Amino acid sequence: MLRILPRPARGSKVLVGPDTWDDAGVYRLSPRQALVQTVDIITPVVNDPYAFGRVAAANALSDVYAMGGSPFAALSIVCFPERGDMAILRGMLRGASETLRRAKVALLGGHTIRDAEIKFGFAVTGAVAPRRVVTNAKARTGDLLLLTKPIGTGILATALKRRLLGDRDRRALTTQMMTLNRDAAAAMVAERASAATDVTGFGLLGHALNIARASRKTIRIWSQAVPYLSAAPDFVARGVWAKGLDSNMAFVDPATSWDEGVEASSRRLLVDPQTSGGLLIAIAPSRVNALLRRLTRAKVRAAVVGEVTARRARALEVVA
């Protein structure tokens, strides 16, 4: 569908548009300043309205962080039943306001729609220096790939909806989704990352595929190095996952070379749709240790999960 949109004219101030499937758009205001703009809206992934509000805000802000930007303003988008419980809506707004306050982002207003299903999100504006924009289109051959949050939120959120998730795993799921990618983004910018994206609805492999296509490289994922939320593999073994997982598999499979040692359960985990997931960062091997040190100081979990190679027959390679 993006192919029907007009492309920016040569010399345009649009630095990042829709043609590279990136996380946000970037518009140059001056040689020293550009705007980063994004919009994201989600359905409830946890039961507590306050926690859902915090997750929705963190999820929307993440796209700006993934571009190396600093968000500063937001507009809310709320879909809510006409006869819905206003206490739920107040809790959502209170939670979102808390996350925005922590991120030092001003809530300027928003728009509300009557809808049978609750949905919540934000249009977010941030700032970035044009020369410091981090896109998904500049991964280089030889770069290593770091992931800053374990995957599995889609599987655990599905287990929660089915009332299968215990309290400890529910807390782990909620805490991770509420966590901002701000510190991880600051670290990757400081260490001059080549490329990045945040891992959300398309799953780890779907977003890795976007980097591969935009950068015209092949991404090799080391499946055994990828961190998971501890309960996720067990639920996959029990057949618990969201419908979006199957759609993601259909999306990535034609572009993926699978090593025979990668089990079916691991393949499903790698395409699990994430909410407020971590950053997938491509960086030169000489900078990896420095980036890991910065992330550790910021109390950000990270793992090296793959590498960037010259373009091969498939855009993605998944090895055991």
Image: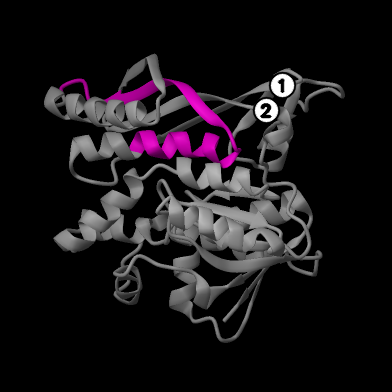
Q: Do residues under tags 1 and 2 come within 8 Å of each other at their CB atoms? A: yes
On the image, the x and y values in percent for residue 237 come to: 33, 77
Crowd around label 1: few <14 · some 14–19 · many ≥20 (10 Å): few
Give the SS element for disc 1: loop
Pick out the residue farthest to the bottom.
Answer: 261
Question: Horizontally, is 275 left or right of 313 in the view?
Answer: left
The location of residue 204, given as percent across then percent down, is 53, 59
Q: Which residues are magenta?
A: 56-83
Q: Classify residue 301 by image quadrant.
A: bottom left
- At label 2, counting other C-alpha atoms closer than 10 Å, the crowd grade (few under 14, some 14-19, many 20 or more) is some
Chain-order first, disc 1 or disc 2? 1
At which x and y percent is residue 158?
A: 29, 57
Outermost residue to the top? 109
Q: Which mark is residue 319?
A: none
Q: Which mark is residue 32?
A: 1
Residue 129's disc is 2
Q: Residue at x 75, y 48 (%)?
A: 138
Q: Is residue 74 magenta?
A: yes
Residue plotted at (65% across, 42% down): 21
Q: Disc 2 marks which amino acid?
A: Ala
Residue 287 vertical position relative to residue 230 in the rendered view, above or below: above
In this rendered view, identify the residue nearer to me: 86 or 15.
15
The answer to whether residue 115 is seen in the rendering is no
At 54% across and 74% down in the image, what residue appears? 223
Q: Quadrant of residue 89?
A: top left
Q: Residue at x 65, y 56 (%)?
A: 282
Question: What count of labels does the image hold?
Answer: 2
Q: Is residue 278 visible?
A: yes
Location of the C terminus (image quadrant): bottom right
